[in-house]
Amino acid sequence: MEADDLRIQVAWACRILALRGHGDFTLGHVSARGSEDSIYMKRSGLGLNEVTPEDVLTIDSTGIKLEGAGQVHREVVIHTELYRARPDVGSVIHTHPPHSIALGASDAGLSLLGHDAALFKDGVGVFDDSADLITRPEQGLAVSRALGSRRAVLLRNHGVVVVGKDILWATISALTLERAAYIQAIAVSFGGLRPMTPEMAERLHPDKYPDDYMADYWQYLIRELRRQRLDHGMPEAAQP
Ligand SMILES: [Zn+2]
């Protein structure tokens, strides 16, 4: 994918995450891996809901800025270390969504209560070394170890890191994780939990999460942003 298209996708991903409860002042960041080791990442100092393609920096595999105006987020090592550890990952998201943080601050673990949780049938990692900001490469490496081969890791008392093979998968997975945690919080208030079996989740997964659904969900979310006039500074919709 072209650099310009990746910048646009990163900006849309930020808006989508803000729309669905991942915003937290100017915190949280999204990146996508480009060709030749370049990484496209939201700059610091902006809320997720106000990122435009011009606010997406090009950085190298060590987190040094190559192109773009503005500062690199201090937690850039989350991105650089995960890309290094996971060649299959094309996009990394770090945000502070409330229900997922609450889940990570408990001993509960994610329960297979519904279709949302079934996306995480292989489990979610937990990083509990510390609640510090992740600013040093060795901390980023520790986060990548806690993630392992999974889609998401809960940073205990801090936030989440969600990855995907591309930005669509990473974004939809981040929304789905927060929704699964939200559903679990509601279910706990009703009483004892009745999760589906791991076998059921395994069977459901390919039907519920095929590749082409991601493109449909992505386009739907962009239409929703446009309808709500939350697309300021973004490219116009392509004319038929
Ligand atoms: Zn953070």
Image (cartoon, grey):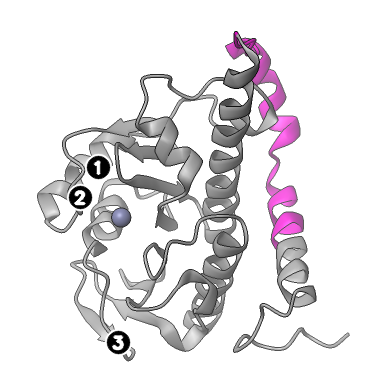
Q: Residue 102: give x, y in percent of width and height.
A: 42, 35
Q: Residue at x 66, y 81 (%)?
A: 231
Q: Secondary structure at mark 1?
A: helix
Quadrant assignment for the C terminus: bottom right
Work out how far the residue at label 1 is from the one at label 2, CA to CA, in angstroms.
5 Å
In the picture of the structure, the residue carrying the numbered disc 1 is: 143
Residue in the image at 52% along x and 79% along y: 50
Q: Is residue 40 magenta?
A: no
Residue 140 badge: 2
Going by the numbered disc 3, the residue's amino acid type is Gly
Crowding around mark 3 (Cα neighbors within 10 Å: few <14, some 14 to 19, many 20+) is some
What is the C-alpha distance between the residues marked 2 and 3? 22 Å
Mark 1 touches mark 2? (CB < 8 Å): yes
Q: Which residue in the protein does label 3 denote? A: 70
Residue type pointed to by label 2: Gly
235 w.r.t. 26: above or below: below
Up the image or down, 215 lies above or below 202; here it is below
Q: Residue at left 36%, top 46%?
A: 159
**Numbered mark located on residue 109 in the image:** none
Q: Amino acid at mark 1?
A: Val
Whether residue 215 is in magenta: the answer is yes
Closer to the eye: label 1 or 3: 3
For the question of whether residue 112 can be seen, the reply is: no
The span picked out in magenta is 192-218
